[in-house]
Image: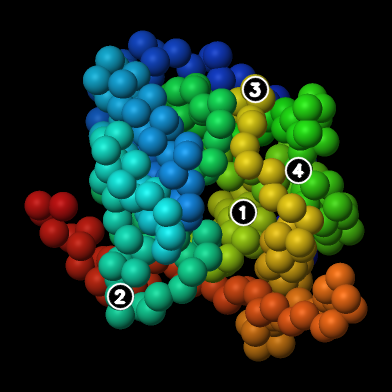
């Protein structure tokens, strides 16, 4: 743990952020031919029927049919109660239920758990994750993220950032980032201060890096990935790309407090707090009539995927 503290305090100058317009589909198609890398686009989704289909159809139309860049689109359906799975499948995605992936490792709702299982469900050398609730989706959300990975072999992970409008205002989104993540980073993880959107849900990485680190099961996954990749590989393997403006479903305050709790738990674990004391985190708050409400928050973690025998067996299969 002392190694982690020492490394995180070695603040390096932030790399110059790149812009999505630097990576044209034509250039990426050529780069993919040269590298021979396969690319999976994955959308973790729960109750996103209104947006997931348009995202999938846009990628299929532009980055599969028009340009040979993406090999597969995989939607991990994390227990949706609406028509998310049907909408995604109709648009051309391969839809996989979270509970059907590595069933012996157990079912566990939560974004991080779905992302972790997607390493097993997806086949690509590069995996690009995009949230399924984006309302103004364009293919540059994908090309911007995989661009550095296809064109620069020194880059292992790419983090997107963007303007986040809310309630008709040009900015003001990212409330959990501003109220929770940035204070935690400033106080405990100064090397992460270089990241413009540390909690953004749009990022991509090389499989060999992603399979070597743990994944927080819940909303702390983005925070944990940044800390763990820097600890294992150094900040120099991470690039940031400007994706422009991102419009999505803004959550109410009572839902944001659940996210905040998971992020705080993930951060505290990475500065040495005993995991046993936060694996069963519970948020206590009061309702409108002042009755006590206690909500259990998922703060557990999945081990590095490369430690899972079923995953390794699949990767060894020549037909995979």
Image-quadrant location for residue 273: bottom right
Q: Is the residue marked by circle 2 packed among few (<14), some (14-19), or many (20+) residues within 10 Å?
A: few
Residue 218, x across and y down, in percent: 58, 65
Do callouts 3 and 4 mark residues in contact (Cβ within 8 Å)? Answer: no
**Extreme-bottom residue of the structure:** 276
Question: Which disc number belongs to residue 103?
Answer: 2
**Residues under labels 1 and 4: Cα distance?**
13 Å
Question: Mark 4 — residue?
Answer: 174
Q: Secondary structure at mark 2?
A: helix
Contact between marks 1 and 2 (CB within 8 A): the answer is no
Left or right: 33 with respect to 23?
left
Mark 3 → mark 1, Cα distance in angstroms:
20 Å
Badge 3 is on which residue?
244
| N-terminal label among 3 and 2 | 2
**Relative vertical location of residue 74 with respect to residue 111 in this rendering, above or below:** above
Q: Which mark is residue 222?
A: 1
Sequence-first disc among 1 and 4: 4
Query: 157 above or below 266?
Result: above
User: Residue 283 location, x and y as percent?
Assistant: 76, 77
Q: Does residue 35 appear in this view? A: no
Q: Secondary structure at mark 3?
A: strand
Identify the mark nearer the N-term, 2 or 4: 2
- Decide: few, some or many residues near mark 1? Use Cα within 10 Å; few <14, some 14-19, many ≥20: many
């Amino acid at each position: 743990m002392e190694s982690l503290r020492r490394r995180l305090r070695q603040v390096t100058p932030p790399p110059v952020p790149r812009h999505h317009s630097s990576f044209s589909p034509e250039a990426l198609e050529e780069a993919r031919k040269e590298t021979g890398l396969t690319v999976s686009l994955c959308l973790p989704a729960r109750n996103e029927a209104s947006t997931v289909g348009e995202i999938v159809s846009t990628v299929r139309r532009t980055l599969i049919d028009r340009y040979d860049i993406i090999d597969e689109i995989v939607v991990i359906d994390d227990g949706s109660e609406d028509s998310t799975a049907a909408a995604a499948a109709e648009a051309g995605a391969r839809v996989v239920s979270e509970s059907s992936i590595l069933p012996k490792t157990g079912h566990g709702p939560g974004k991080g758990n779905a992302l972790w299982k997607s390493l097993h469900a997806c086949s690509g050398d590069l995996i690009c994750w995009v949230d399924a609730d984006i309302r103004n989706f364009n293919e540059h959300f994908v090309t911007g993220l995989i661009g550095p990975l296809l064109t620069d072999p020194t880059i292992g992970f790419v983090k997107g950032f963007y303007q986040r409008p809310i309630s008709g205002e040009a900015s003001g989104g990212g409330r959990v980032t501003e109220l929770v993540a940035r204070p935690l980073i400033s106080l405990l993880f100064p090397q992460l201060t270089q990241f413009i959107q540390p909690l953004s849900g749009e990022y991509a990485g090389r499989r060999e890096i992603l399979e070597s680190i743990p994944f927080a099961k819940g909303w702390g996954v983005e925070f944990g990935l940044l800390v763990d990749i820097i600890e294992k590989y150094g900040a120099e393997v991470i690039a940031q790309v400007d994706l422009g403006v991102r419009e999505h479903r803004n959550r109410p305050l009572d839902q944001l407090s659940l996210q905040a709790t998971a992020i705080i738990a993930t951060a505290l674990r990475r500065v040495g707090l005993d995991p046993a004391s936060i694996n069963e985190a519970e948020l206590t708050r009061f309702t409108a009539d002042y009755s006590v409400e206690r909500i259990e928050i998922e703060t557990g973690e999945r081990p590095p995927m490369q430690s899972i025998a079923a995953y390794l067996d699949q990767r060894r299969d020549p037909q995979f």
